[in-house]
Structure formats: C-alpha cells, structure tokens
Amino acid sequence: MKQPYELTIKEAIDLMNDGKLTSYDLVKSCLDRIEGMEPTINAFTYISKEKALQQASQIDERRSKGEPLGRLAGIPYSLKDVYNTYEEPTTAGSKMLDGYISPYNATVYEKLTQEDAILIGKTNCDPFGFGSSTENSAYGITRNPVNTEHVPGGSSGGSGAAVAYGGGLFSIGEDTGGSIRCPAAFCGIYGLKPTYGRVSRYGAIAYASSYDTVGPMTKDVYDNALVMEVISGIDEKDATTSPSDIPQYTEEMMTTIKGKKVGYVKEFMGEGVDKDVKEALEKALEKYKALGCEIVEVSLPSTEYAIAAYYVIGISEASSNLARMDGMRFGVEDSASNWKEKIINARGKGFGAEEKRRIMVGTYALSAGYADKYYHKAQAVRGLLKQEILKAFEKVDILVTPTMPVTAPKIGENTDDPLKMWLMDAFTVTINPVGVPAMSIPCGTDSQGLPIGMQLIGKHFDESTIFAFANAFDSSKE
Ligand code: GLN
C-alpha cells in the first residue's frame, strides 16, 4: 500500500471522498516526508506546518458536515518561491528579497485557495529564475531525489524535487525558458509550460515578462490537466491573459491520437544530444507510430540562433525588471548614510554572481548604440522562430523533441562555465519566445538510471492535444 505522500491528486481525492483518508493525515504524511528528506534535498525555502495542518482539519470538518468543497479540497501543494502570498515570505531565491512579505496574493494562489488546496511550503529556485540547476540560489543548492549527487534541474528545481519525493502532491513552477520542463525532465515528473496568456502571471515575480508562464508540476498527466483547469483563465490583473474558454482538460486528454501527425524536429536530434536520450526519443516516436500516428520530419533552421536570441531578450527584460530592487525596505542590511552608497551596497551584496551577470549583459544589450546590434536583432530572430514554428504546425499536430539534450548533470559539473549551462537549454528556450505550450513527460531512463524527459510542443492554446499525446504514451506503457 502506498503512503499518503506517494499518492497522486486523483488517488488522494478518491480516497478522501470514500472516507478512507483525511486531509489531516495526508498533509501530516507530506510534512513528515519533508522533515525526513529536507536535510539532504533542500527543496524548500519555507514550510508552512501549523497553517497547513489547521487548514486540513478545517477541510475534514467541512467534509464531515457534507458542506460543498473545492476541486482540490485538502490537497497539499507547494509554490515555487517566486509567487507572492501575504502570509508567507517570498524570496525568489535571492538575498535581495530577504525579509520581504508581499502585501498581496498571486492570482494562482488565490485560485488554488478557492478550490481548497493547501499550501505546504515554498520551494527553492535559482534567483529570479536565473538558471537550469538550482545551484545559484542564495538559500543553498537543491539535490535531485532520484540521485542526490545530481542537480534537480532549474530554475524550479525545488518544485521538481519536492513533487518527486512526495513533499506535497503537486507544485506550481514558473517557466521563462524551461524552468518547469527542465526540472520535470531531470526529476522524472510531468511539467507543463502553458500557452503565454493561459494562466495569470499576477503576483509572480517577473524574470522576463514577455516569456514568463505559470504552470503545474505533477506526478501524472491527469493531475496536470486537473490543476490546469483550476489555474487557467482570464484575470483583470494580468492584461495578457486570454478570455478564451478553459477546456475540460481532464476529459479532452482521453481523446484518441490515432491519425494525428507528429513532427520530428531534425535539428533537435543531432549533435550534442546524449545517446541514451536520442534512443529514448526514437523509441517514443516508434510508439506513436504504433498508436496510429504519422511521423513527419520538420526543419526549424532558425533554432540555431534560438539560445542567443532567447538570452539577449530574456536578460534585457530581466535587467529592466530588477531595476526596482533597491534594498530600501528589505534585502541586505546596510548602514550607509547616503542614497547612492546604500544602493551600491544593497545591490552589490544582495545580488549573486548570476544576477549581476545578467543585469550587466542585459543593460548592455539594451543601451543606445548596442540595442540595434543585440536587442533588436534578437527580436527579429524571435519573429523568424515564430514563423517557422507556426509553419510547422500547418503540417503537424504536435512536435516531439527531447526536453533536455542530456540527463541531470552532477552537482558542480557546470558551475564554472555559465555558457555551458546556458547551452543546455537549447530545446526549451526556443518555445517561450513563440509562446506556444510545451510539456515534459518522463520517457525512460539513461544507463545510470537518471530520468529522460520528452517534450511535447503544441499549437497556441492547444494544451488538450499535448495532454492527449502524453496520456496515450503513458497508457500504452501498461
Ligand atoms: N535556464 C533558463 C534561464 O536561465 C530558464 C529559466 C526559466 O525558465 N526561469 O534563463
């Protein structure tokens, strides 16, 4: 029998509805698991013990009285530590926000609270989302629970690790260029980066506002679809959210994929992709063929420039977003007597090396005289990427690629070489400048037993097809 912390959301809901599990026992089981695992893994920056147990008891009481309950009633989950809530601290993984308590709640938190989900804690991440390994956090590195000598991926590495080890049944990650998909791939879980505009960003600490997306990290496809039904939708506080209807993802994921066309991106299967990753992907494509899909080769030539374009635009926006961090009301303590000195000290001590690198390069790329050479050129590449991907979708229903070219590197393996770290993101960063949805699902393990992720890329607002492909892949395993 599974321990409560090992359950999926659906299993836990069914057990609670049948009176075989209480939310209190479920939350307690996750908290005990966190206590046991955290000394090694460090997935959390904040644990909400008392409040979570109290909420669980309240939900059990309401349930016993037969009161109506929300769709995620009594389910414990975590938020990446970039989501503002006014009863918990929010650090974004940086010392710059040490001691910061937001005066308002993020929309995603409000929506989950409305459905009676229970926040169990906030998870560690690379500062402001800057990284692919969760080694840049000011609050220590996070380890991969599958193999603790390896990184969990990033920047939502705490979320990936927490879901993988059972520190809550799901987590809300944030993806600007792969931060949901990369840790999902490295930790062997399911992570969806929704279409830009599908889920409100209100209350998410911004990295690059034109790329940032909010999405679920879960133990299976159904749970992912269920959480998406709850968190999607228009929000008057985020003008970029779409008014389009929220599909019943949990039903649409059951749609057959027979007869659909799968695009195989040849540029994403070449040099630099690990042999084991390539083999796992080839097997997956065979499986789709066996399920009645047609495999079509697709070429996206501009992806050669995707990493460069993504980073130039991303860090330009980041340098602008971070300009507001002045250390005046929270952050690093400093006794400087004048304003200029205070700001220099606060930003100098509060930001870590990765934040400084990005602020400096981003400011440079935006400055008069260089903007045409870098920022505007990168925007032109963004246009090309969009055209190529939309054109590919005239021929196919979905694109299938590896999520990452490699499996989880060892801790410290890339920390001396930031460029190598950035290059690892080739297949995920291509997606955010275009805005289409993409999901990482597990598709095997390498020779060391480390998880391999497969990326399913859909058309704008077509998360349903992604879920259907993910579900068909998993169902054919059994
Ligand atoms: N690794 C990428 C970066 O550092 C993605 C980060 C993210 O999605 N937040 O920019």
Image (cartoon, rainbow, N blue to C red):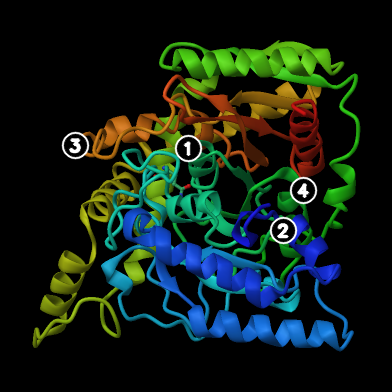
Q: Counting residues from the N terminus, which is met first, the one under dot 1 or under dot 2?
A: 2
User: What is the total number of numbered labels drawn onto the structure image?
Assistant: 4
**Near-viewer residue (194 or 411):** 411
Using the numbered discs, state the Cα–Cα distance from disc 2 to disc 4 in whole angstroms.
Answer: 9 Å
The residue singled out by tag 1 in the image is 186
Q: Left of 467 or right of it: where is 102?
A: left
Dot 1 surroundings within 10 Å: few (below 14), some, or many (20 or more)? many
Name which residue lies at 54% across and 31% down: 403
| Residue depth check, mark 2 versus mark 4: number of the one nearer the observer | 2
Name the element at disc 1: helix
SS for callout 2: helix
| Classed neighbour count for the residue bearing mark 3: other residues with Cα under 10 Å, few (<14), some (14–19), many (≥20) | few
Q: CA gap, disc 4 to disc 1?
A: 20 Å
- Mark 3, secondary structure of its residue: loop
Q: Which mark is residue 222?
A: 4
Please give the residue where the numbered disc 2 appears in the rendered image.
9
In this picture, is 336 found above or below 272?
below
Is the Cβ of the residue at disc 2 closer than 8 Å to that at disc 4? yes
**Residue 437 appears left or right of 293:** left
Q: How far across and how far down the image is residue 23, in percent?
A: 69, 74
* Inter-mark Cα distance, 3 to 2: 39 Å
Mark 4 crowdedness (10 Å alpha carbons): few <14, some 14-19, many ≥20: many
Badge 2 amino acid? Ile
Q: Is mark 4 within 8 Å of ligand 1?
A: no
At label 1, which amino acid type do we have?
A: Phe
Residue 239, given in percent of the width and then of the height, sits at 67, 66
> Badge 3 is on which residue?
416
